[in-house]
Amino acid sequence: MKIILNSDVLRTGSLIKDALPEHWLTFFKECKKKKCPIIIPQTVGLEFERLQSEYVGLETKQLSDALRLLDDYHVSHGTIDPSRLVLKPNIVELIRKLGTEVIVENPTYEDFVEAHKRACLHEAPGSADKKSDEMRDLIIWVIAIRTARKDGRALLVSTDKIHSGSAGDKEAASAGLIRVKTFGEALGFFGFDTPAGSFIKHILESVWKELLKAELPLEKNISTIGIYDTVFVQKLENILEISSKITLKMSDGNPLSAKIQVLLFGDIVESFYMSAIKFPGVSAEKSEISLRPRSSITLEKDDYLERLQSLRNVLGGQQ
Amino acid sequence: MNIRMGGQIFSNVQIPLLWGTRAVIQDIKGRISIIELSGAKAKPEIIGDKPAPGIEFRPVLEGYEILEQARPLYTYSPSEKLLMGRNLGLPDCQIGPNAIRVGTNTFSGNVVEGSGVGIIVTKTGIGMGAPLPKALAELII
């Protein structure tokens, strides 16, 4: 399946030098594994270039200013040409270096005509409240719809209202265009473990033996089908409260669904409460299980007090 | 408050960056704190790049999704210093080493002095050197 990217998911707060941001890397590497080509519409490539050019200008100026200052103080330095040192990144090359296939998709004449018509007539997925860059968004939309229609389905990653709003629901569904807002959501769509899911799995591993002792008809080794609606709340004094809905695989292959509530004291699983336990074909459902496993899991050391003090220092003018 | 943040100098301002009703502040180690000011008291949601106590959140690929009654409000990426508006209807906001990016706009090398707010970001626009909006809680943690 092809994945079309909008410019808003490719924006950064600084110049991209040698490496892409970490979560982009995770996403592009997963696309390579799943053999999903990335489509960068030319419009998106140009917008990426524009923002990066601003950062190139900024860093070139800073470097020039630094050299001028060194000269003012008669500090010797080699010949440095900031404009040759600060380079504009090539997003296509950076992604290709990871081994991921990238296609730069130029809008066709028909794409322009279609986007132009929709912009003028305020047709879906646009809305009556006009935006200055609506035409660009519509071109990307038309390319995404065209790609999905041609291949049977495609995935669009965009946070833009025009792309993710309900006005485009009908057309996206008929074309087979799936829409997500972030790289994380896109990975979730591919069944990639989310960080929240990984954390819950980690906890389940630590209590699995106890769950088997509680006579739940689960597989001997942990096997999850789904983990969703996970909510974490960091309480004071190193206490973390977690709730989630889970679906586990039973020993007969059927799914078992339940809600869990977990209390962590530091890296110790202090309590594990399972409720609304449901599994098919069994008339007597277990309603709840409460464990106090006191098993330990590996957690990052909490530096809350130091972080709080650092914030207070800024607010108190001590920075 | 006097603070250098995202390539700007904020001198004698009350809030350097106001994202909707949330104050965004960077500490000396470059970590971001996000404090919600719409209630009667300031409510920290992110303290030094991590979720604050009492806040509902979910770890996601990008960092943390801040929730309200299990509904995602916004996502904060500590590695990218990026705030993504999700259901707040606000443009993305990113604190870079030399610039602050708000949506498609980049602020760099500005000095804001003696204002209530250094950079203000609302659903409808962006401004520099704005007065402190009324009905916000005092920024005391």
Image (cartoon, rainbow, N blue to C red):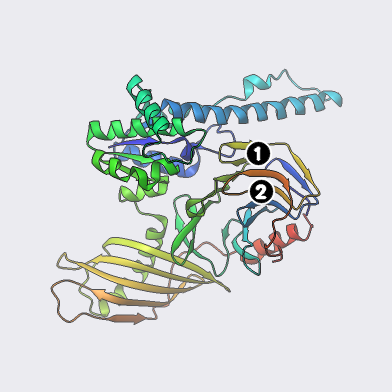
Mark number, residue B34: none
Name the front one of labels 1 and 2. Answer: 2
Asked if residue A109 is positioned above or below residue A129 in the image, the reply reads above
Left or right of residue A19, residue A86 in this image = right
Discs 1 and 2 share one subunit? yes
* Front residue of A208 and A307: A307
User: Which amino acid is tagged 1?
Assistant: Ala
Q: Does residue B139 appear in the picture of this structure?
A: yes
* Chain of the residue under label 1: B
* Chain of the residue under label 2: B
Q: Residue at x 44, y 51 (%)?
A: B61
Asked if residue B66 is positioned above or below residue A289 in the image, the reply reads above
Q: Position of residue A243 (x, y in %)?
A: 40, 70
Q: Residue at x 43, y 69 (%)?
A: A242
Q: What's the distance in space between the residues labelled 1 and 2, CA to CA? A: 15 Å
Labels 1 and 2 touching (C-beta < 8 A):
no
Asked if residue B88 is positioned above or below residue A140 in the image, the reply reads below
Circle 1 sits in a helix, a strand or a loop, which is it?
A: loop
Count of numbered marks: 2
Q: Position of residue B110 (x, y in %)?
A: 74, 38
> N-terminal of the two: label 1 or label 2?
1
Q: Position of residue A237 (x, y in %)?
A: 58, 74
Q: Residue at x 60, y 37 (%)?
A: B105
Mark number, residue B120: 2
Which corner quadrant holds the N terminus of chain B? bottom right
Mark number, residue B99: 1
Q: Residues within 10 Å of mark 1 (few under 14, many from 20)?
A: many
Left or right of residue A4, residue B128 in this image = right
